[in-house]
Amino acid sequence: MDLLELTARAEASHFWFRGFRKFVAPVLAEIAAGRPGLRLVDCGAGTGHNLSLLRPHGRVFAFDLAPTSLAKARVSGRPLVRGDITRIPFRAETFDVATSFDVLQCVRDDRAAVAEMARVTKRGGSVVLTLAALEMLRGDHAEIWREERRYTPATARVLAEQAGLEPLRVSFLFASVFPLMLGVRTLQRLTRRFREPRADADIGVPRAPVNAALTAIVSGEAALAGRVRMPVGSSLLVVARKR
């Protein structure tokens, strides 16, 4: 089974994806501030599952470079076009909001990608990123997805600023499960020489009671995320404004 199929199977029920949506949905609602008819674009949309987060706020566009992603999204009725995030196929200042969720760590030229996101965003518009955090969390998942890097708050902030964006928020996500993820991924690194990385690492859905408990934990963290900044986490959220 390929990575995209594994992801598609996990997105509906896996505690991480459930938590991700609970972190991101309020951020998008705050940016939209009740304004109707925004134009939004998701850059590197994968299966297209996350487009449901954008749709309440206006007209949604999306693209991905991988043909398998396009096929998966179109079968499920989610419209995507083919495009490279370092050469986004839209005119400058087209969108009110541009998003990219857990893509940039796998893009060789992440600076070019964010610069392109800034280019297609209107002045005063918003760019929302989620990024893999901290090199200490490299594990099987990073190997399978061929991550180029992981980010710290400082490097994420610089990435936005170099694209002419003003970072309004740079914060950790998934602090509540950080110790668990650190332990699992440290073990993966220590045993790497004895085995092959698992394709389903981190996205195999845990048994129902475990998945439910972890969903409750990350949902509780997400409920606090707008008021409490966590000191550590496995992901970073960046909200930036185009000057």
Image: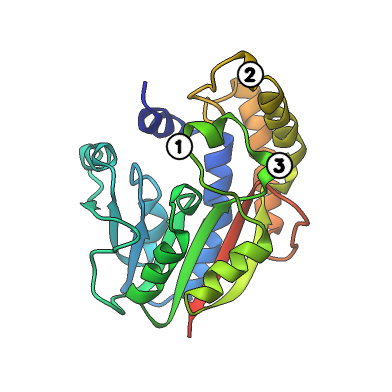
Q: Quadrant of the N terminus?
A: top left
What's the residue at 43%, 33% (across, down)?
A: 7
- Residue 228 % position (x, y): 75, 62
Whole-percent x, y for residue 209 in the image: 65, 23
For mark 3, what is the residue? 136
In this rendering, would 60 be left or right of 127? left
Q: Position of residue 18 (x, y in %)?
A: 54, 42
Q: Nearer the viewer, residue 78 or 105?
A: 105
Residue 12 visible in the shown view: no
Viewer-side label of 1, 3: 3
* Mark 3–mark 2 distance (CA, rounded to whole Å): 18 Å
Looking at the image, is 125 positioned above or below residue 28? Answer: below
Please state which of residues 223 and 135 is positioned toward the viewer in this rendering.
135
* Mark 1 secondary-structure assignment: helix
What type is the residue that disc 1 sits on?
A: Glu
- The numbered mark at residue 11 is 1
> Total marks drawn?
3
Crowd class of label 1 (few under 14; some 14 to 19; many from 20; radius 10 Å): some
- Residue 161 lies left or right of residue 217; in this view the side is left
Q: Which residue is mark 2?
A: 193
Amino acid type, callout 3: Met
- Mark 3 lies on a secondary structure that is helix
Residue at (33%, 46%) from the top-left corner?
A: 48
Say whether disc 1 or disc 2 marks the residue closer to the N-terminus: 1
The image quadrant that residue 236 belongs to is bottom right
